[in-house]
C-alpha cells in the first residue's frame, strides 16, 4: 500500500476502508459517514465534531451536520470493521524485521464529569482515558504507520488492569501479522514487567529495555542478576554515534554529544520460563557523561556477528524518533479536545483519527521521520557540541544553516 498508492486520494482511501471484503455492508449512509469524518478530521486538524462539521463546508446548517456525525459515531460494529481493515492494511507491510512499537499515552479531561466510563483514581487527579498505540516502521525506511489505537479506562465493563488492555492490543496485532515483526516496548511509557507474561509466548518476537536491575536471569545454568551480567558481558562490537540531546536536558540549548557505543550479547532464560532469550549489554561512553550501561532483553538469539547485533541496536535506538514523530502528528489534531459523551463514540472517533494518520504517513507519505536522535555523523545545525568539528565540516554546517 505505502509503495504503490501515492496517488490515492483520501476519498478513495475511505472507499478502501469500507470495501465489501471487510465482511460488512456499510451501505450508502455508512460510507458517506466514514468519508465525511476522514475529510473533516483531515481538513480541520481536529477531533472536535464542531470543527469537523465546519471543515466539511456542507450547504446545510452546521448543527445538522454535527447531529448527523454524532448520531453515526454510536456504532461499535463500524469501529470493529474500520479497525480490522486498518490492521489488515498495515499487516500486509510487516516483515520479520519491522519494528512494532508499543506506546501508551493518555487523554486527560480535567473538568469533564458526564463522559461515560471516565477514569477514577486517587493517584490521577486528571480523569481521562488511556490509549495503547502500536506503530510500525521498516528499518531505514524513514517512515512509519499506526497499526491500531486501543482506548480504555478503569471504568469500562470487564476492566481487569491496564496491563491486560495492553496485552489485548498486542495480541490483535500479533494475530493480524501472523507473528511477523519485532515488538519494541517504549520504555518512556511502559516497562518490561508490564508485558512480561507475553514474553513467555515462544511465537512473540520482542526487544525491551529492562529497568529492574535486580531481576534474576539464568545464564549458563546459573542464577544471576541483570546488574551482575551487565558487568560480565563482553562488549566486543562498537562504533561512534552522535546523540542529539534536547534543550533543557543536559544544557540550556540543544547539544550534540559524541558517544562510543559498544554492545555484547549472552544467551539467557527468565527464571520462570524455559524460552531461550538473549541479554544485550549496551554500553555508552562520552567525555561529557562518562560510562552508562543499559540492559536489554530480546527474543532474538544467536547474536554472534557485528551485523546482527549492531543492526538490532540501530533499530532499537531509532524507536524514540518514531514515537516523537507520531506524537507530533497526533497532537496536531489535539485528540484530548474530543466532545463526545459515550465510550462507543469515543472509540470510533479515535479509530477514524488513526485512519487519517495512517493515510497521511503511509499512503500520502506527507510526514517523514526527519530528526534522528542517534546518527552516524554529526548533526547539522548550530548548537553546543561535546567534540570539535573539523574546520571544513564547520563551514559546511554553517552554510547549510
Image: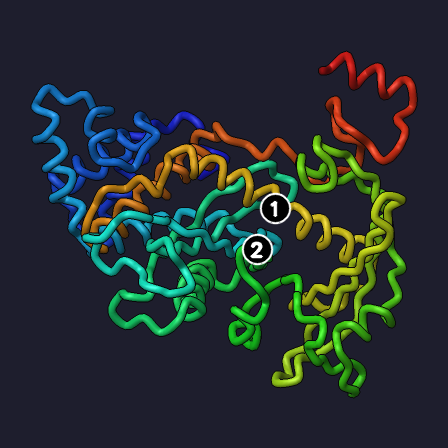
Q: Which residue is mark 2?
A: 186
**Residue at the (83%, 50%) spot, across then down:** 261
Using residue 2 as the reference point, say whether residue 338 is left or right of it. left
Q: Which residue is mark 1?
A: 320
Tag 1, which secondary structure?
Answer: helix
Q: Nearer the viewer, residue 163 or 93?
A: 163
Q: Position of residue 280 (x, y in %)?
A: 76, 64
Q: Position of residue 339 (x, y in %)?
A: 23, 42
Q: Is residue 317 visible?
A: yes
Q: Residues within 10 Å of mark 2 (few under 14, many from 20)?
A: many
Q: Position of residue 198 (x, y in %)?
A: 52, 72
Using residue 387 as the reference point, say whether residue 37 is left or right of it. left
* CB contact under 8 Å: marks 1 and 2: yes
Q: Residues within 10 Å of mark 1 (few under 14, many from 20)?
A: some
Where 51 sits versus 276, above or below? above
Q: Position of residue 98 (x, y in %)?
A: 58, 51
- Kindly indicate the quadrant of the structure image that contains residue 300: bottom right
Tag 2, which secondary structure?
Answer: loop
Distance CA(mark 1)–CA(mark 2): 8 Å
Q: Nearer the viewer, residue 263 or 129?
A: 129
Using residue 400 as the reference point, say whether residue 391 is left or right of it. right
Amino acid at each position: 500500500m505505502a509503495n504503490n498508492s501515492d496517488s490515492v486520494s483520501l476519498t478513495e482511501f475511505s472507499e478502501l476502508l469500507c470495501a465489501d471484503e471487510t465482511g460488512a455492508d456499510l451501505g450508502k449512509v455508512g460510507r458517506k459517514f466514514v468519508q465525511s469524518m476522514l475529510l473533516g478530521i483531515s481538513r480541520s486538524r481536529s477531533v472536535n465534531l464542531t470543527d469537523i462539521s465546519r471543515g466539511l463546508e456542507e450547504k446545510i446548517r452546521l448543527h445538522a451536520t454535527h447531529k448527523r456525525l454524532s448520531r453515526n459515531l454510536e456504532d461499535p460494529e463500524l469501529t470493529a470493521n474500520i479497525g480490522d481493515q486498518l490492521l489488515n492494511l498495515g499487516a500486509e507491510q510487516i516483515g520479520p524485521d519491522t519494528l512494532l512499537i508499543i506506546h501508551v499515552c493518555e487523554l486527560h479531561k480535567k473538568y469533564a464529569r458526564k463522559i461515560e466510563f471516565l477514569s477514577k483514581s486517587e493517584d490521577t487527579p486528571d480523569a481521562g482515558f488511556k490509549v495503547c498505540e502500536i506503530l510500525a516502521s521498516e528499518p531505514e525506511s524513514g517512515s512509519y504507520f499506526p497499526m491500531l489505537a486501543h482506548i480504555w479506562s478503569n471504568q469500562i465493563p470487564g476492566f481487569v488492569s491496564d496491563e491486560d488492555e495492553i496485552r489485548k492490543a498486542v495480541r490483535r496485532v500479533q494475530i493480524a501479522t501472523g507473528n511477523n515483526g519485532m515488538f519494541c516496548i517504549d520504555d518512556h511509557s511502559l516497562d518490561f514487567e508490564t508485558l512480561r507474561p507475553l514474553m513467555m509466548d515462544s511465537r512473540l518476537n520482542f526487544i525491551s529495555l529492562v529497568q529492574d536491575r535486580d531481576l534474576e536471569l539464568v545464564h549458563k545454568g546459573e542464577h544471576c542478576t541483570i546488574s551482575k551480567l551487565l558487568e560480565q558481558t563482553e562488549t566486543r562490537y562498537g562504533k561512534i554515534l552522535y546523540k542529539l540531546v534536547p534543550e533543557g536536558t543536559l544544557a540550556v540549548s540543544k547539544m550534540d554529544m559524541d558517544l562510543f557505543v559498544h554492545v555484547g550479547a549472552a544467551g539467557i532464560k527468565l527464571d520462570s520460563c524455559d524460552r531461550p532469550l538473549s541479554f544485550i549489554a549496551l554500553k555508552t561512553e562520552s567525555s561529557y557523561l562518562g560510562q552508562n550501561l543499559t540492559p536489554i532483553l530480546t527474543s532474538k538469539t544467536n547474536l554472534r556477528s557485528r551485523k546482527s547485533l549492531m543492526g538490532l541496536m540501530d533499530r532499537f535506538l531509532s524507536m524514540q524518533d518514531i514515537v516523537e514523530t507520531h506524537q507530533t502528528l497526533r497532537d496536531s489534531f489535539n485528540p484530548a479536545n474530543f466532545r463526545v459523551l459515550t465510550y462507543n463514540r469515543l472509540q470510533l472517533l479515535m479509530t477514524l483519527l488513526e485512519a487519517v494518520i495512517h493515510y497521511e504517513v503511509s499512503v500520502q507519505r506527507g510526514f517523514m521521520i526527519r530528526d534522528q536522535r542517534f546518527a552516524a555523523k554529526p548533526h547539522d545545525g548550530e548548537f553546543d557540541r561535546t567534540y570539535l568539528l573539523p574546520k571544513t565540516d564547520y563551514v559546511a554546517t554553517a552554510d547549510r544553516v
